[in-house]
Image (cartoon, rainbow, N blue to C red):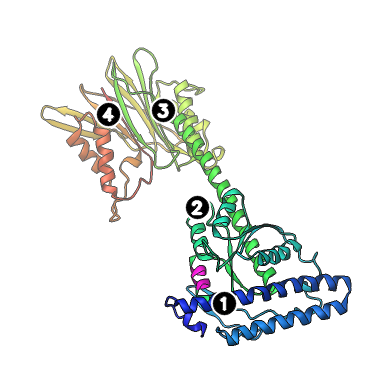
Amino acid sequence: MSDSTMNSGSSPTPEELQWAHVRHDLRTPLNQIIGYGEMLEEDAQAAGQDAVVSDLQKIQQAARRMLQLIQEHLGGAAPKPAGGPSTVSAGSKSVVPQSAPVSAPPGSDSDAGPGAGRMTGRILVVDDNAPNRDVLSRRLERRGLTTRLAEDGCVALDCLAEESFDLVLLDVMMPRKDGYETLLAMKQDESLRNIPVIMISALDEMDTVIRCIEAGAEDYLPKPFNPTLLRARINACLEKKALRDAERLHVAEIERTQQRLARELRDAEAYLRSLFPRPVQAPVAVDWFHQSCSELGGDALGYHWLDDEHFALYLLDVCGHGVGSSLLSAAAINVIRTGSLPGANLREPAEVLAALNRMFPMERQNGLYFTIWYGVWHAPTRTLKYSAAGHPPPLLAVPHGNRIEVKELDASGLMIGAFDDADYDTVTCRIPEPSQLIIVTDGCFEIRRPDGSMMTGEDLHAFVQEAWASPTLLEDWFHHCQDALGNSSLDDDFTMLRVQL
């Protein structure tokens, strides 16, 4: 009966299964004779016992001849000559059946004695035949490997649950739970799926081997084992396992670093938020809205009473985003809030901007600069004095009966830090009662739509004209911009400050 019938993809008949078991039972002791003979041959060569080596080689050759006769007369394809393996495709991998091994030439690693080719690792050997387990474990331990033995798949899974292994050598044909079922159980277990598995098979079990390779087995070894092939495939799997373990450790370290950085960024963001004053209702009503485009933004705002009559308002925008921009933003806003500006009267906007320009030159700020609008409201006279340094003009909304007038409060001036000798002008204007002053950064209107077109200050101007009386004007404009963005995200920080005067 030919094994090609069993490997055709159809389920084997009871008769085919019976013959497969017969071949398995006949080959098992012969494989053990070859295995023990090779190990004894290594020892004899190491001891210089040439006569014993010759006898052991004859025993192995006789056993290999018996294996060949079993293949020829009891079914299965005849063994291929050494060096001419055929290849069976298994999805994206190739399974290469190996013939019965021949003795390695003198001077090769397999002749070098039990101490040669040392390896390290923990290997689980799974085979229902005790002598098979013994032969294989002895081979591995001679190379410095640590082994544990299991007689079937159920015991193997118990062992894997108790301790860690670098490799599993898994026999295909076993009672209770065979190699394929054991492999599937491993691959379905998150804690076991990354352990490499080498299937152990006879030549007429190639259909199962192919299924195992497709299910995730790393490789396979045919019986009887060629010492050189055994060592090479185990070493390759252990090296891959070591690389994967190192990669997982590296990824885990990166994840821990990212989590730590995320916590630190959240703490930094919370600190920057703490610098923003709370909204106030009287005697001047002020509220604001801020949305950063990244973990840390470069926008900051503030307002506070300089004395009983003068109320300072300011909004700044540092170029760029991230840690550097946020640090400069925090430094500048703290300087203004605490009044730490030598030579500047905080009631005079132009003097404040000139002092900031001297204090924060961009060559000392890693090339960073910022724009700012700074104004001082004098409550008794309803007068607003303001200056700007490269900042968008705020909008002033003034009701006239049923009509709303919205105009820009223009002021020219270069951004802070760009030029040492920059001059700033102060603009003074009277504000009718009631009025609303809306101060913004350019991220509130320079927004690119999905079709590539840009929103402008005119869009904001028109929106304020329609919705100026809404108590949620700032949030409403933000949601309007989000709708315009579609699935895109903000390119810049979004900050708005509204003052009801």
Residue nearer the viewer, 416 or 448 = 448
Residue 266 screen position, x and y as percent: 46, 35
**Which sits earlier in the primary sequence, circle 3 or circle 2?**
2
Kindly check if marks 4 and 3 are in contact, taking CB atoms under 8 A apart as contact: no
Kindly check if marks 3 and 2 are in contact, taking CB atoms under 8 A apart as contact: no
**Which sits earlier in the primary sequence, circle 4 or circle 3?**
3
**Residue at disc 1, secondary structure:** helix
Q: Kindly identify which residue carries mark 1.
A: 22
Q: CA distance from mark 1 to mark 2?
A: 37 Å
Q: Quadrant of the C terminus?
A: top left
What residue is rendered at 20% in x and 28% in y?
398
Q: CA distance from mark 4 to mark 1?
A: 95 Å
**Which sits earlier in the primary sequence, circle 4 or circle 2?**
2
Q: CA distance from mark 4 to mark 2?
A: 59 Å
Placement of 277 over or under 55, stated as above or below: above
The magenta stretch spans which residues?
208-214
**Which sits earlier in the primary sequence, circle 4 or circle 1?**
1
Q: Kindly identify which residue carries mark 4.
A: 437
Residue 24 screen position, x and y as percent: 59, 75
Q: Kindly identify which residue carries mark 3.
A: 350
Q: CA distance from mark 1 to mark 3?
A: 101 Å
Of badges 1 and 3, the one in the foreground is 1
Residue 47 screen position, x and y as percent: 88, 70
Is disc 3 surrounded by few (<14), some (14 to 19) or many (20+) residues within 10 Å? many
What residue is rendered at 40% in x and 23% in y?
348
Residue nearer the viewer, 376 or 427 = 376
**Residue at disc 3, secondary structure:** helix
Of badges 3 and 2, the one in the foreground is 2
